[in-house]
Image (cartoon, grey):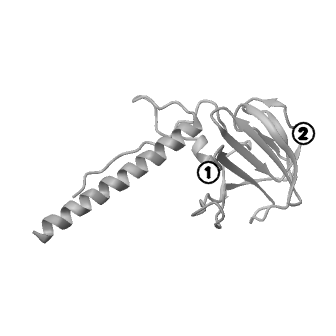
Amino acid sequence: MFKNLLRAGLLVLAASVLAAAGSALAAASAALATPRPSAHEAPDEPAADYQAPLDGPVTVTRGFEPPSDRYAAGHRGVDLVGVPGQTVRSAGPGKVVFAGMVGGRPVVSVEHPGGVRTTYEPVAASVVAGQAVAAGTPLGTLRPGHPCPDEACLHWGLRTDQNVYLDPLSLLRRHRVRLLPIT
């Protein structure tokens, strides 16, 4: 009898975890406002309206580490290898909502449809707040100074209008969710 209760408890726990994961995935998908892939699309196909902010291959020196809560430590974005003076481009269409200094570093923020915002730092801005941009529009040039093992790195962030931080690399690929049977 104890085994049956334990098994039932584990099934309820697994169902709860799956439901929570499904809700989180649905919220993130809605926030990113990207269409769901059809059966014939590759799972890692780039999202329709977004691209990498730096030209060339995407090389990550530090990945996304979500904070456990709003004020906790974490890495609220990714660091991409670049070179000083390299053009930084808007990852998607939207409107520049900030171009200025934050904590002594030059930052550009772009608000995109669907309630998400991307941030780029350290970037000497060539755009101004209120300016409309398309995917690929130059925002400015990469400056040295962000701590990383290379000559220069771009810190690229993504958050929702509810201040939930997401992995900005999710803008570049689609994820296929697959449920595995419980054994």
Identify the amino acid type marked 1: Val
Asked which quadrant contains residue 139, the reply is: top right
- Residue shown at 24% from the left, 55% from the top: 182
Q: How many marks?
A: 2
- Residue shown at 41% from the left, 28% from the top: 40
Q: Is residue 91 left or right of residue 12?
A: right
Reading the image, the residue beneath label 1 is 164
Secondary structure at badge 2 equals loop
- Residue shown at 60% from the left, 51% from the top: 167
Q: Nearer the viewer, residue 161 or 149?
A: 161
Viewer-nearest of discs 1 and 2: 1
Quarter holding the C terminus? bottom left
Asked which quadrant contains residue 110, the reply is: top right
Q: Nearer the viewer, residue 58 or 17?
A: 17
The image shows residue 15, relative to residue 49, as above or below, that is below
Question: Is residue 52 at least partly visible in the picture?
Answer: no
Question: Is residue 79 at least partly visible in the picture?
Answer: yes
Mark 1 Cα shell of 10 Å, populated few (<14), some (14-19), many (≥20): some
Q: Is residue 43 left or right of residue 80?
A: left
Q: Is residue 134 left or right of residue 78?
A: right
Reading the image, the residue beneath label 2 is 126
Mark 2 Cα shell of 10 Å, populated few (<14), some (14-19), many (≥20): few
| Residue 138 percent coordinates (x, y) | 82, 36
Secondary structure at badge 1 equals loop
Q: Nearer the viewer, residue 34 or 30?
A: 30
| Residue 143 percent coordinates (x, y) | 86, 54
